[in-house]
Image (cartoon, grey):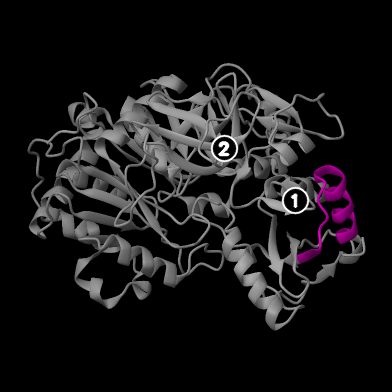
């Protein structure tokens, strides 16, 4: 039965009507582009579609994909959706030294999904349970497998209520969950993003984001929705040489490209590498910045660094999203810089009161607007008792609407009696625009002061000129002293001063700007700060690891590397 609120045209149906026009480019390097015309992509998808049916796959089955960005993955998505199957992208860099996923987590994801088919590469096979051996199709063998299959070109066999995507999200606990995204939800969110951003077939989309990241998948589906030209950079290519991102935007005269907030800061650090290069960014009209807290200073630093290349001050726009809304929850409109609210930090953190403050004042913080809710999504702010917060108060951000989660795969989702989903984020609305202050479970409380770890991390990263994600703040209960202890992990860099002096600087600056006393600064490596697949810090996991390590050996928390050290700041 069709979904009662079915979108008049589903994404896969729109694509099928104009399949000869939907082409794409895979840019493995600056000198190696693989272009696949629309009719070639659809012919390949037709072979996969027939091959899936020959293997016994049926409507409603799940096709899991754990392989690098490639044309074969895109063809598999089209093939699955054409037959009413769902897809789920998984991380594939399990064996990499900098991987954010362990083999155990990968196994948990597969156990949750129970896919009927797994497309992957030889590098991943050692991490796949033996029971799935007969369900594997290797990327290295896909061409030979598909070559002997006649393409299936029958009518699209999907409806609005069919599952389109199982979007994996680990949250702060590390246990995998999969948001069930129907064809209707996917199409509604694509339409809402296109409407807000003004996307059309004249646009050119560039993305290097991992396909298992909700923002990475949405870059593709948005381009497909409006029939825009699509250029995909394999994430590994970006990781090896990050400058390929802006070079590709320049070379293809791209207009759209999303990225997590940290990517813009990284590019700022690489700005000198573009000196004397023919870089042109004047075509780039809209850039999402999301997946992690967005700080105005980081965005403005990026804009200043690249304005000489034609980058518009209004290109980069903070965005609020999550897998539970497919991806987009709120977005700013293009064409003008985003709004900023300077608010009194103490009143916000102590009483949840949103009081305007003078820009740059000592006790003021700048919060960026994430725009208004996209079409079909409602956002409201509630207190802990479930009552609506009045204007000028922060609280729990809750959502409902046409692209908002109804269930997790094999797990219930908690909605209140009016259908509101609690995001776990703390924020407020101003002029109907969304401002995010932190996470409910992440709040750090000390002497009656509630502080967001994001603000502490931002202060540390700014003080030490570190890139985003290089600091992690959390608290844990120290049973020996019956006190809540505040810990900051800092990624050690060779340019740092002596750690004791640096730790004292951190403690003084955090106390001055956040009103929180730090008990301990620990120096670690990047890999010792666990993060979700979308880049969010897993604070609950950090808290558990730290508490366990401190219990066994106070100086061995998180098993620091030889250069690591713990500085007790209780006397600072």
Pinpoint residue 77: horizontal percent, then vertical percent: 26, 46
Q: Which of marks 1 and 2 is in front?
A: 2
Note whether residue 227 is visible.
Answer: no
Whether residue 372 sits left or right of residue 140 in the image: it is: right
Q: Given contact means CB atoms under 8 Å apart, are the residues at marks 1 and 2 in contact?
A: no
- Say which label, 1 or 2, has the lower sequence index: 2
Packing grade of label 2 (10 A; few <14, some 14-19, many >=20) is some
Question: Is residue 244 or residue 558 the one in the foreground?
Answer: 558
Pinpoint residue 539: horizontal percent, then vertical percent: 61, 59
Q: Quadrant of the N terminus?
A: top left
Find numbered disc 1 in the image and state the secondary structure of the residue it sits on.
Answer: loop
Packing grade of label 1 (10 A; few <14, some 14-19, many >=20) is some
Pinpoint residue 278: horizontal percent, then vertical percent: 63, 31
Using the image, determine if residue 185 lies above or below residue 242: above
Question: Majority secondary structure of the magenta segment?
Answer: helix
Instruction: Indicate which disc residue 429 carries.
Output: none
| Residue drawn at point x = 30 percent, y = 54 percent | 409
Question: Is residue 241 or residue 499 the one in the foreground?
Answer: 499
| Residue drawn at point x = 47 percent, y = 42 percent | 422
Instruction: Indicate which disc residue 383 carries.
Output: 2
Instruction: State which quadrant residue 514 falls in.
Output: top right
Whether residue 186 sits left or right of residue 145 in the image: it is: right
| Residue drawn at point x = 20 percent, y = 42 percent | 162
Find numbered disc 2 in the image and state the secondary structure of the residue it sits on.
Answer: loop
Q: State the extent of the magenta-drawn residues as a range.
A: 502-522
Q: In which quarter of the image is the C terminus?
A: bottom right
Pinpoint residue 46: horizontal percent, then vertical percent: 15, 44
Q: Name the residue under label 1.
A: 466
Note whether residue 464 is visible.
Answer: yes
Q: Is residue 513 magenta?
A: yes
Mark count:
2
């Amino acid at each position: 039965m069709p979904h009662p609120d079915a979108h008049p045209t589903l994404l896969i149906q729109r694509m099928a009507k104009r399949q000869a026009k939907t082409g794409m480019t895979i840019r493995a390097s600056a000198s190696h582009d693989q272009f696949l015309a629309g009719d070639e992509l659809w012919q390949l998808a037709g072979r996969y579609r027939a091959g899936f049916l020959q293997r016994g796959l049926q409507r409603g089955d799940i096709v899991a994909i754990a392989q690098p960005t490639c044309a074969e993955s895109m063809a598999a998505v089209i093939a699955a959706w054409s037959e009413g199957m769902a897809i789920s992208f998984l991380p594939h860099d399990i064996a990499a030294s900098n991987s954010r996923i362990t083999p155990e987590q990968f196994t948990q994801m597969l156990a949750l999904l129970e896919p009927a088919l797994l497309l992957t590469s030889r590098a991943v096979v050692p991490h796949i349970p033996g029971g799935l051996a007969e369900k594997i199709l290797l990327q290295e063998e896909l061409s030979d497998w598909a070559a002997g299959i006649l393409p299936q070109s029958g009518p699209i066999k999907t409806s609005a209520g069919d599952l389109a995507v199982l979007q994996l999200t680990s949250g702060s606990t590390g246990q995998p969950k999969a948001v069930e995204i129907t064809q209707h939800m996917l199409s509604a969110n694509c339409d809402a993003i296109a409407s807000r951003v003004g996307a059309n077939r004249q646009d050119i989309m560039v993305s290097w984001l991992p396909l298992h990241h909700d923002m990475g998948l949405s870059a593709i589906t948005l381009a497909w929705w409006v029939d825009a030209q699509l250029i995909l950079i394999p994430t590994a290519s970006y990781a090896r040489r990050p400058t390929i991102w802006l070079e590709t935007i320049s070379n293809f005269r791209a207009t759209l490209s999303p990225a997590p907030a940290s990517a813009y800061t990284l590019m700022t650090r690489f700005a000198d590498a573009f000196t004397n290069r023919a870089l042109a960014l004047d075509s780039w009209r809209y850039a999402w910045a999301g997946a992690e807290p967005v700080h105005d200073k980081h965005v403005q630093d990026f804009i200043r660094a690249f304005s000489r290349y034609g980058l518009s001050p209004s290109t980069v726009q903070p965005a609020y999203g999550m897998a539970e809304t497919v991806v987009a929850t709120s977005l700013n409109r293009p064409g003008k810089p985003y709004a900023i609210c300077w608010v009194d930090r103490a009143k916000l953190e102590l009483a949840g009161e949103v009081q305007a403050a003078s820009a740059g004042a000592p006790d003021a913080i700048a919060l960026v607007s994430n725009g208004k809710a996209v079409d079909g999504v409602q956002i409201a702010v509630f207190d802990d008792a479930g009552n609506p917060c009045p204007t000028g108060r922060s609280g729990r951000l809750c959502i409902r609407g046409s692209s908002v989660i109804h269930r997790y795969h094999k797990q219930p989702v908690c909605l209140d009696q009016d259908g509101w989903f609690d995001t776990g984020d703390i924020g407020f609305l101003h002029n109907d625009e969304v401002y995010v202050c932190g996470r409910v479970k992440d709040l750090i409380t000390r002497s009656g002061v509630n502080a967001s770890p994001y603000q502490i991390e931002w202060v540390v990263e700014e003080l030490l000129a570190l890139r985003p994600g290089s600091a992690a703040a959390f608290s844990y209960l120290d049973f020996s002293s019956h006190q809540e202890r505040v810990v900051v992990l800092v990624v050690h860099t060779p340019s740092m001063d002596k750690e004791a002096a640096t730790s004292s600087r951190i403690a003084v600056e955090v106390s001055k700007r956040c009103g929180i006393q730090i008990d301990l600064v620990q120096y670690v490596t990047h890999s010792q700060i666990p993060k979700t697949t979308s880049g969010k810090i897993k604070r609950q996991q950090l808290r558990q690891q730290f508490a366990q390590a401190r219990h066994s050996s106070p100086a061995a928390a998180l098993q620091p590397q030889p250069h690591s050290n713990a500085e007790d700041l209780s006397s600072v």
